[in-house]
């Protein structure tokens, strides 16, 4: 989407009442904060059901961009457009930089004054996020949201913004979380338990969950987390991520067995456990090569670890764009992640007909059933991973069975067409409810 020219002046609106309520509770403020309620839109019961929809997808991150979320949005947009729908995507980088810069300065000054006056101080991270929420809302004031049949927020932040703006328009609003939000940040000590940041971000999570008329979840692991935030079972639909992966013809290796790991080199992806596992069984096999595909902050540390463990057949390929070609040359795919939702790399490996070993993190066990479509190990367990690796290295029949089952499952359940069709059905079901 091209950057938007905003012809009308943008006004600064009030802080989000649900956020201030959460902060007031944290700081012990009893003075009520006046909510700015308005409903100037038509009633939702007056909506006529169109055959082709005009859909707005929102994201708090840059778009287009290289990344899992952006790839998901692009696939959803392309798939819906192939069905004849009109799809717009709005992201913060779509607005003029000069307007954004000036507006953010003014919003920041207002929020600093507000937080200082009400609480006597401010948290830098909360201040920045509050400004970004307000900025996104202000920029959207110049867009006619009434024109859309469906609004689909792809993160908790734009779900908050669209929820407030949607008080005027009463459009069906959907929310798709792509991560475990505050729940996960607490788990990995990115937010301190009992802190003001916990109060703030849980308020964001709860509002995103309750403001949406329906939630599309990427896997069932989201369901209990969202229910604790106020979501109802009947208002959540699980739709697995679909991809368009052009698998190439397999090129069997006659002189060696190739293990491939495709992932960013970051701590939670668990590469160090894969290297530890290989070191434990390296004397029990010959002619095995591990190819690590991807880049990131862990690269130097992992290269040093491979040298220290005397793993001579580990190759770091860096970031690559020829994943289908690399997987066509591979026999076993391993993703030793310690925290994930539903990794695209595992889905790609399924389409590529790989014998897969991965962990029971997030939604992975929903598509990789142990001994059926792959092998499952506990995260951070290098001994168990070593045992499973050795099992596949020694049993070509098992490798073939797992690879064939994984490919079949992916072709039946994990295509873009299947994903888009199911989401489209949710859109129409919401519009039909509005007519009743």
Image (tube, helix red, strand yellow):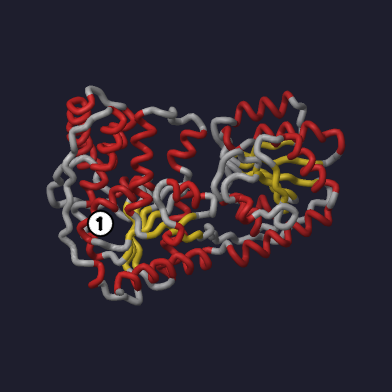
Please give the name of the residue rendered at 59% of the width and 64% of the height, measured from the top-left corner.
413
Percent position of residue 195, x then y: 38, 28
Q: Nearer the viewer, residue 135 or 113?
A: 113
Tell me: residue 106, above or below residue 136.
Answer: above
Q: Indicate the quadrant containing the C terminus: top left, top right, bottom left or bottom right.
A: bottom left
Q: Is residue 324 visible?
A: no
Residue 17 lies, in percent from the top left, at: 23, 42
Label 1 sits on a secondary structure element that is: helix
In percent of width and height, residue 3 lies at: 28, 51
Number of numbered discs visible in the structure rendering: 1
Residue 301 appears in the rendering:
yes
Residue drawn 14% across the image and 45% down it: 11
User: Residue shown at 75%/51% (left/top)?
Assistant: 331
Give the left or right position of residue 59, taking residue 252 as reference: left
| Label 1 Cα neighbours within 10 Å, binned few <14 / some 14-19 / many ≥20 | many
Residue 184 as seen in the image, left or right of residue 413:
left
> Is residue 400 placed above or below 258 in the rendered structure?
below
For the point 43% across and 28% down, which residue is it? 192
Q: Quadrant of residue 108?
A: top left
Query: Which x, y percent locates residue 258?
Result: 75, 46
Identify the image quadrant of residue 269. top right
- Please tell me whether residue 71 is drawn above or below residue 275 in the rendered image: below
Quarter of the image where the N terminus is located:
bottom left
Q: Which residue is mark 1?
A: 166
Q: Is residue 6 left or right of residue 415?
A: left
């Amino acid at each position: 989407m091209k950057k938007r020219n905003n012809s009308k002046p943008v006004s600064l609106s009030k802080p989000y009442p649900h956020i201030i309520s959460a902060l007031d509770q944290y700081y012990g403020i009893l003075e009520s904060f006046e909510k700015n309620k308005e409903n100037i839109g038509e009633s939702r019961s007056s909506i006529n059901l169109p055959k082709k929809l005009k859909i707005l997808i929102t994201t708090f991150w840059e778009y287009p961009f290289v990344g899992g979320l952006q790839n998901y949005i692009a696939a959803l947009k392309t798939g819906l457009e192939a069905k004849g729908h009109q799809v717009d995507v709005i992201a913060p980088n779509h607005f003029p930089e000069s307007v954004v810069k000036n507006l953010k300065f003014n919003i920041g000054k207002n929020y600093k004054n507000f937080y200082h006056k009400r609480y006597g101080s401010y948290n830098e991270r909360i201040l920045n996020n509050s400004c970004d929420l307000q900025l996104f809302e202000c920029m959207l004031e110049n867009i006619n949201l009434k024109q859309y049949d469906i609004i689909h927020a792809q993160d908790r932040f734009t779900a908050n913004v669209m929820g407030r703006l949607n008080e005027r328009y009463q459009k069906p609003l959907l929310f798709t979380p792509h991560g475990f939000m505050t729940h996960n940040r607490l788990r990995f000590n990115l937010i301190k338990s009992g802190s003001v940041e916990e109060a703030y971000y849980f308020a964001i999570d709860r509002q995103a969950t309750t403001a949406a008329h329906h939630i599309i979840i990427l896997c069932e692991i989201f369901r209990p987390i969202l229910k604790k935030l106020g979501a109802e079972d009947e208002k959540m639909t699980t739709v697995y991520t679909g991809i368009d992966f052009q698998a190439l013809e397999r090129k069997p290796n006659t002189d060696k067995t190739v293990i491939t790991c495709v992932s960013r080199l970051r701590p939670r992806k668990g590469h160090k456990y894969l290297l530890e596992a290989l070191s434990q069984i390296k004397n029990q096999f010959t002619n095995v090569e591990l190819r690590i595909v991807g880049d990131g902050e862990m690269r130097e540390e992992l290269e040093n670890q491979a040298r220290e463990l005397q793993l001579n057949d580990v190759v770091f390929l860096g970031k690559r764009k020829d994943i289908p070609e690399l997987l066509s040359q591979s026999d076993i795919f391993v993703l030793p992640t310690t925290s994930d939702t539903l990794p695209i790399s595992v889905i790609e490996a399924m389409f590529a007909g790989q014998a897969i070993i991965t962990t029971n993190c997030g939604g992975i066990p929903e598509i990789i059933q142990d001994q059926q479509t792959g092998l499952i190990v506990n995260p951070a367990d290098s001994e168990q991973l070593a045992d499973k690796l050795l099992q596949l290295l020694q049993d070509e029949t098992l490798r073939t069975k797992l690879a064939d089952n994984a490919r079949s499952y992916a072709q039946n359940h994990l295509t873009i067409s299947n994903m888009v069709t199911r989401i489209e059905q949710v859109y129409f079901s919401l519009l039909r409810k509005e007519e009743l």
